[in-house]
Image (tube, helix red, strand yellow):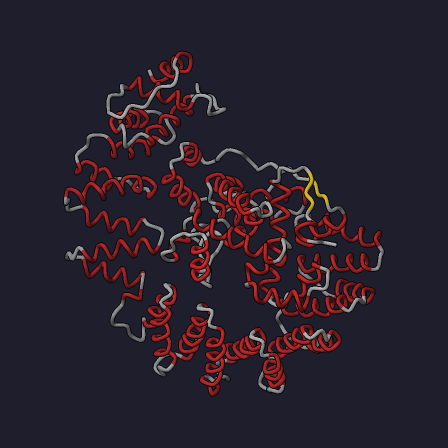
Amino acid sequence: MRFIVLILSVLLLSCSQLKTDESYSKEEFENLHINLYAGKTDLDLYSRPIQDAHFYKLAIEKEPEMPLSSCEIYQDLASSNFILKEYALTRSYRVCPYTIDEIIEFYFSLKLKSHRILLLDFLLTATKKLNHPSYEYLLYETVLLENESEAKEKILLNLISLNTNLKKMYTSKLHELSPRYVSNYNNENILKVANDFRKHQDFQNARNLYSKIFINIELSLSEREDSYQKFCHTHKLQKNDLLFLNCLKNYLAFFKSHQERMVDEYSKTEILYARTLWTQQNWDQAYQTLNQYLKLNARSDDFKANVLWLLGAMNEEKKKWAKAIEFYRQAINLKFTDEELQEKIIWKIVFNTFRAKDYQLTINEINSYLTSLKLNDAFLLKLKFFAGYSHFKLDKLIEAKNIWNELIELDPFNYYSLLSQIILNPNLSRISIERYKDQVHYPQLKWAYYTEDKKVIEYLADEIKSIDKSSLYLMNDYFLIGKYREAMQLATILHSRQIEAKNKLRFIPYLYPNAYSELTTSFTNEFKLPPFLSTAIIRQESAFDPLARSGADAFGLMQIIPSRAMLLSKSRNKTYSNYSDLYKPNYNLELGHFYLLELNNQFNNVLPFAIGSYNAGSEPVIRWKKERYFGDIIEYIESVPYFETQKYIKLVLRNFIIYNLLYSKEEKINFSKWIQIP
């Protein structure tokens, strides 16, 4: 019957007007369905699975207005071969005239989380309204099914307020989830309580407890040391640089007598204290402190290499290139184990010869390291790029081109390969790479995606992941249903397993999804920002996870800190309540784009400066620009003293170039106007 009506509807019917009552017949409902979907899909409307999916989707949409008609559709689908028939059956219990006890009995017969979640909110509303005895248990069931800790916390507080016989159990669960609600803390749980206060930005209560911990000699030295570090970090989170510096100084004094028992932690804090002095413009004191560290006997070569590396970097800031290289050469001759530090020191030697404009010596240095050391691929590409760049500076264009072409062939989407391509040809052509598949692979997930049943999508994906952890299919399905972080993680693994460049290409669209494009395009146009700049930043900041939260307490897609959000919201005449507002994509993206506009205008549309400011703030970038920028933006980026910010600029620029190459409407893209590459 449904199939016949469907065909007749396509041939004969014009658009129907929605009724506002329950007077639809089954045939009218089917006719309405056809008119809603006619002309809006290129799929075969006569295919039974497509018909079923359309009916399922329409029934979901019309549940509030026409529950009985939706009920008929669900029951019909539940008795068919529809791939989501179990979900149709579950949904029927939301709208069909079952008693509350029948619905509860059915609910507890369900095994899968993705089934139960469809009924739970409906049952909670119904049982609460009827004061049904199952309400309390169902509310607790929500705690078990809910993924977000803050939502769990609210539910547990609600359960405790019911003041039932199970209040003690709920309180225990709350304390386990959110230790800051513990009133009688002890040596066993005090650190967890303090950490939870810190997590929820109650820094004063966190510091009160941390201070009790690090003076408590009954606790282990590692617990006391950890609490003091976190005590100091609360000042950093609150952007109180002076208190943070003084806290580090007090830490070193407090644990001085224990330093031999905690040499690694103590040494790291000594280094951090000297770095903080330097970054807070106490150059002379920092330099003196580091030189005093070199005189300490009971220190490892790793510690001394770090000290020498910092002394070299500080001399770079004073433009004393020869002195800087002297410290770096002392460091590289030590027998230390930190491979990452070794690369950083080698790079400093190479880069300072480049900055001294001794390009032939730069080439010689690079060649000596390429032949004598085993280097990781990323560092190898970096050295090769600067070998080519040194040839370029010497007007040896053929040599430069040969090196860069080799680089591009090795990895065309690496930051240094992209720079090479832009120098060789400022107008790059847009590229076209097809995704692996345009359809969801897993049948139930496929149809849940097609019918836009968001609740089923979320929980089905988690259930599938527990079975299939690293396949092309799951990567593709994650991408299509909007779980971009998970798709990117799988794509990274699968991309790294490929040897040939052509096989790596297929993963690029998954590694660089154009997510939230409607919002980002709208705000980009409103604020006249470079295309895909915000998308490049979102990818790096949150991997498109709207609920992302960093260790520095930045929130949401564009990782905005609350203090910044308060300022930006006032400028945009928007209400800001608390950090939870930043989890809302539209709100977060509006503030983030507006902040990008401010930074871009401040630095005259030169992206490396604006991007660096998004990460480190404007003040240090203004200082670095004055002290370190001499007309070569590539050289400037390498000279940024904050390693995290330097890396961030490169990654976001890489993202920006790739997003434009993948998604721009222009056939040719000129990047020099944004990046100022020579």
Question: Is 36 left, or right, of 511 in this rendering?
Answer: left
Q: Nearer the viewer, residue 635 or 132?
A: 635
**x, y percentage for residue 23?**
24, 21
Res 335 visible: no
Q: In which quarter of the view is residue 78 placed?
A: top left
Q: Nearer the viewer, residue 559 or 189?
A: 559
Res 457 visible: yes
| Whether residue 349 is situated above or below residue 382 in the rendered picture | below
| Whether residue 190 is situated above or below residue 136 in the rendered picture | below
Q: Nearer the viewer, residue 237 or 177?
A: 237
In which quadrant will I find the C terminus?
bottom right
**x, y percentage for residue 600?**
59, 54
Q: Nearer the viewer, residue 221 or 579?
A: 579
Question: Is 232 left, or right, of 64 in this rendering?
Answer: right
Q: Residue at x 36, y 51 (%)?
A: 147
Question: Is 652 left, or right, of 198 in this rendering?
Answer: right
**x, y percentage for residue 323?**
73, 78
Q: Residue at x 24, y 57 (%)?
A: 157
In which quadrant will I find the N terminus?
top left
Q: Residue at x 81, y 64 (%)?
A: 359
The total number of labels drawn is 0
Q: In which quarter of the view is residue 472 placed?
A: top right
**x, y percentage for residue 482?**
47, 42
Question: Is 100 left, or right, of 542 in this rendering?
Answer: left
